[in-house]
Amino acid sequence: MMDMSAKRIMLFGMGDVCYDIISSFNIKLKEYLENKGIAVDLINVNGRTGYSRDIVECFEKNSYAAAISFNSAGEGMIKGKDGINLFDHYNVPYYLFLLDHPMDHYVKIVNGPDNMHVICIDRDHVDYVRKLRPDTEKIHFILPGGMETGGAKDASEADFLKRPYELVFTGTRKDLSALGDDILSLEPPFKTIAAELAELMLSERQLTNDEALERILKDNGLEGLPGSDFAAMENVVNRANLYVRTYVREEIVRILMASDIRFDIFGNGWDGLMSEAGENVRLHGSVSYSETLRLNGKAKLMLNIMPWFKNGSHDRIPTAMLNGAAVLTDHSRYLDECFLTEAGNDEKLFFYDIEHPERVGSIASGILADRERLYRTAGRGREYAEGHMTWEQTGDAVLRLIEEASKFSDNINF
């Protein structure tokens, strides 16, 4: 049994990418681990060379229970002079915590160390990784916790209703025509497969990316690909997934912009739609991830549009809840299991259906018109998130994985 007091954990920073979300996640996980008495070393890998020397120096000086990376590129594939992955050479388990669909990280998954664990935020993503990594015991489902600003809770319904924003959305708008051109730039047969894949997912929106691709491959006489080849194909044509996500995001936002709801949008690219918007819409431009946290504490209702995660969740949901905002989101099987109830019966968030996007405006209007229901749902959501969706719960789950792999469970008490 290893002595936990001599063990450390390594994290990897990525600077300001992804609205500095990775930096924020690192801060939360570092705080959690240090509160548990575990020393943490944070290696910055974004936009710099030579960080592998920092890793080697740390490994030579200290003993590590694990290294944990959020989406980070490169460090999980570094090899030493002997040609062996650094994490395998020093026998340090490497945990790749993916915040996207794993097809976007195909190379990292395939070329990562032998002693690599992959953490997914959608249960279907676990199945994708299993096509590429034979050790199913090292593939896990864990959701990132929400963030809260530390602001005071709304003491009453009146306080909640004083929040300055009715409906808020945070996110960028990408150029759909450019994404379509990206698909058309693929070589045959990938161009055909990607175009048909995007068309199918938009026409049958309950399908996962994997389910849709299986049908398209069958239609093109390519059914029955081995798991690893299927996963590779999904990576090659993943532009279809990005196109579909972008299309649906813009579609939902356009519908709400055309309604009479007071709608505040934070993110780049939406000014191109202002000709369609009424006086009810306010565009605020890009904001940092830390600023989006504060917005959650000022909104009555936060809009979430899932990034085609059909059996998982997104950190926007617990973050909104923890900051006292009600959430309006599309479905996933995981979210339905946790939150789907009869209307008005112990609601903790609100749903709309991306298969019927035309209804989202009336759904949002009805929610905002019933102020008591809105306030009660926000309160129940916050209470649920405080008990089930914090970074303490995420940290506990990650640490349990490390405990099991490293066999030092007797040295940590939860």
Image (cartoon, helix red, strand yellow):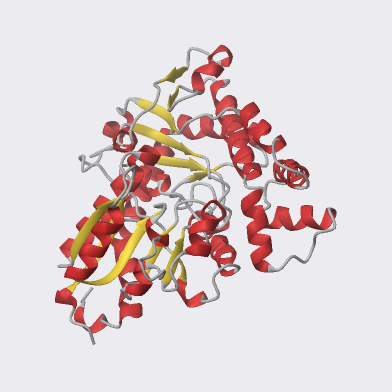
Residue 333 in the image: state x and y as whole percent. Answer: 57, 57
Coordinates of residue 67 in the picture (x, y in percent)? 31, 65
| Residue at left offset 46%, top offset 31% | 368
In the rendered image of this protein, does residue 72 appear above or below residue 131?
A: above
The answer to whether residue 388 is visible is: no
Query: How many tags in the picture?
Result: 0
Residue 376 visible? The answer is yes
Q: Is residue 133 above or below residue 382?
A: below
**Between 37 and 348, which is closer to the camera in this rendering?**
37
Residue nearest the viewer, comparing 337 with 412: 412
The one nearer the camera, 246 or 183, is: 183
In the image, residue 76 lies at what x, y percent? 40, 61
Q: Quadrant of the N terminus?
A: bottom left
- Residue drawn at (47%, 29%) of the image: 369
On screen, residue 246 above or below 333: above
User: In the drawing, does residue 45 fall left or right of residue 336?
Assistant: left
Q: Is residue 390 left or right of residue 302?
A: left
Tell whether 97 sits left or right of 386.
right
- Point out the residue furthest to the front here: 81
Image x and y of residue 93, in percent: 35, 72
Out of 24 and 148, give the one closest to the viewer: 24
Q: Residue at x 65, y 27 (%)?
A: 177
